[in-house]
Image (cartoon, helix red, strand yellow):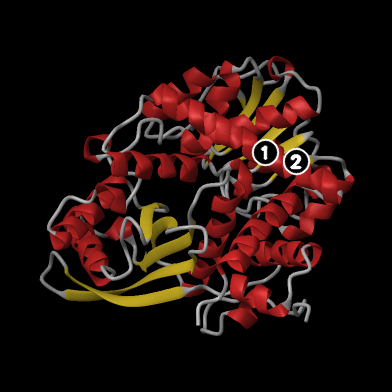
């Protein structure tokens, strides 16, 4: 029996929550999932299995605040699928975190791990809080109690968290220590994204940006464009955007535009990226006042004529409202969901190669996998070895995706979902359903 094409994210996830529409990146993900399911002729049972999370946990997290009051926060951890291996995914702290969002992001992680051939399933976690209003002590207590409440879920062979929105290596250190105290032994492999001194991996900070650049170079090669002749625009100058700009600059590309929350900066002759990074760091991580380029709007940056556009800021930046004005030859999605599903066909009709987020920004989870491997071995690699292995895996993932796109005459995004879903579905069929 074929799957029901009318199934939406909101019909799968019954809990009350924010309305998810087709301009939402998570609904976009489900729309692309349905397309791949149709190509693969998934039956209704397989579609339902791959759409629904394997486990979802909601916990109350009480914290004694600095003023002596007790405040209770709501925390989530969703394990979407563990067919390929232990689940993997970040933990975010934000006031608008909701179980539906966490479920969708967990599914996204399943496909991201599968497309780069990392032996993980997808997971995601979060706590509904405003970390900007909390002291370091309160954040530590929040993190430790959340971890303690999830001791039956977490584990190096079960579920491995990582940093995400508003969490960092310090938060991961607290999680690792809390889990280790209960395990009565140091368990460094229970989280990734840790400080190097606690078992973190070299090369982790640059991993996502390096992955973006690796697949971008592969895409340029397919189009016959040399990297040292390419022009590049990068939206977002955080970790992913700045590293992507830096590495493309080192390849000899002319980075003509960059941006952050203060606006966008354009120089047709190319921006001195090391100077821009130094300026941003010295200016409290803001490009405000940068004189190495003229100021333009973030919207104008997206529509510049260039060979490569790297949207590395936030979701829904390119939609049906502006997709027809995009002039780049390649778009490499450094952020999650920067292009809505409604813009996909417009960009395809324009002949733009879109390297999708589940492939382009998977460098982070790939090096997280390397960190986990190193922790379990108790032997740590040089940064050169980490980077070499990351580049190899990202290139292989791009070539696999490109081959699927040619086989089915589909876009790289559709091909990435087809490849990932087919891998998980095939593994599930071989393993069977335990009853």
Corner quadrant of residue 2: bottom right
Vertical position of residue 262 compared to residue 80: above or below: above
Q: Is residue 366 visible?
A: yes
Q: Are marks 2 and 1 in contact (CB under 8 Å)?
A: yes
> In the figure, is residue 46 to the left or right of 303?
left
In this rendered view, identify the residue nearer to me: 148 or 230.
148
In this rendered view, identify the residue nearer to me: 31 or 185.
185
Label annotation for residue 402: 2
**CA separation, marks 2 and 1?**
6 Å
In this rendered view, identify the residue nearer to me: 278 or 340.
340
State the count of labels. Answer: 2
Residue 109 lies, in percent from the top left, at 53, 57
> In the figure, is residue 300 to the left or right of 126?
right
Q: Residue at 61% of width from left, 41% of height from top?
A: 360
Q: Secondary structure at mark 1?
A: helix
Give the residue number, with chain letter if any, for mark 1.
398
Corner quadrant of residue 386: top left
Q: Residue at 29% of width from left, 33% of height from top?
A: 379
Q: Is residue 23 visible?
A: no
Crowd tier of the residue under label 1, counting other residues whose Cα lies within 10 Å: few below 14, some 14–19, many 20 or above = many
Vertical position of residue 134 compared to residue 372: above or below: below
Label annotation for residue 414: none
Residue 406 lies, in percent from the top left, at 83, 43
Q: Residue most toward the right?
A: 349
Residue 89 lies, in percent from the top left, at 44, 56
Q: Secondary structure at mark 2?
A: helix
Vertical position of residue 255 compared to residue 411: above or below: above
Q: Residue at 61% of width from left, 30% of height from top?
A: 214
Q: Residue at 64% of width from left, 43% of height from top?
A: 333
Crowd tier of the residue under label 2, counting other residues whose Cα lies within 10 Å: few below 14, some 14–19, many 20 or above = many
């Amino acid at each position: 029996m074929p799957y029901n094409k009318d199934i939406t994210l909101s019909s799968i996830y019954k809990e009350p929550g924010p309305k998810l529409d087709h301009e939402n990146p998570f609904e976009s993900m489900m729309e692309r999932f349905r397309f791949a399911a149709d190509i693969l002729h998934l039956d209704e049972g397989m579609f339902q299995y791959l759409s629904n999370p394997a486990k979802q946990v909601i916990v109350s997290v009480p914290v004694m605040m600095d003023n002596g009051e007790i405040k209770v926060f709501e925390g989530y951890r969703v394990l979407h699928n563990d067919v390929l291996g232990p689940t993997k995914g970040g933990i975010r702290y934000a006031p608008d975190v909701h179980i539906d969002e966490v479920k969708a992001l967990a599914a996204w992680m399943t496909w991201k791990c599968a497309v780069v051939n990392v032996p993980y399933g997808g997971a995601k976690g979060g706590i509904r809080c405003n970390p900007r209003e909390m002291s370091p002590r309160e954040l530590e207590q929040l993190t430790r109690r959340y971890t303690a409440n999830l001791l039956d879920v977490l584990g190096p062979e079960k579920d491995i968290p990582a940093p995400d929105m508003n969490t960092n290596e310090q938060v991961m250190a607290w999680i690792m220590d809390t889990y280790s105290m209960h395990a009565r032994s140091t368990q460094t492999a229970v989280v990734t994204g840790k400080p190097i001194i606690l078992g973190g991996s070299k090369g982790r900070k640059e991993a996502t940006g390096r992955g973006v650049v690796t697949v971008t170079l592969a895409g340029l090669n397919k189009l016959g464009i040399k990297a040292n002749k390419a022009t590049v625009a990068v939206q977002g100058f955080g970790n992913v955007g700045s590293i992507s700009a830096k590495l493309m600059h080192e390849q000899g590309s002319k980075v003509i535009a960059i941006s952050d929350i203060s606006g966008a900066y354009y120089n047709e002759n190319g921006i001195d990226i090391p100077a821009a990074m130094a300026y941003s760091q010295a200016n409290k991580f803001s490009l405000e006042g940068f004189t190495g380029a003229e100021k333009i709007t973030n919207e104008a940056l997206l529509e510049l004529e260039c060979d490569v556009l790297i949207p590395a800021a936030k979701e829904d930046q390119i939609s049906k409202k502006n997709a027809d004005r995009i002039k780049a030859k390649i778009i490499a999605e450094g952020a999650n969901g920067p292009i809505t599903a409604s813009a996909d066909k417009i960009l395809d009709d324009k002949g733009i190669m879109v390297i999708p987020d589940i492939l382009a920004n998977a460098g982070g989870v790939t090096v997280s996998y390397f960190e986990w491997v190193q922790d379990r071995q108790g032997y740590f690699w040089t940064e050169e070895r980490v980077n070499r292995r990351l580049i190899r895996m990202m290139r292989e993932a791009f070539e696999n995706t490109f081959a699927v796109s040619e086989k089915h005459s589909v876009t790289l995004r559709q091909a990435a979902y087809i490849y990932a879903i087919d891998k998980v579905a095939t593994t599930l069929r071989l393993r069977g359903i335990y009853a």
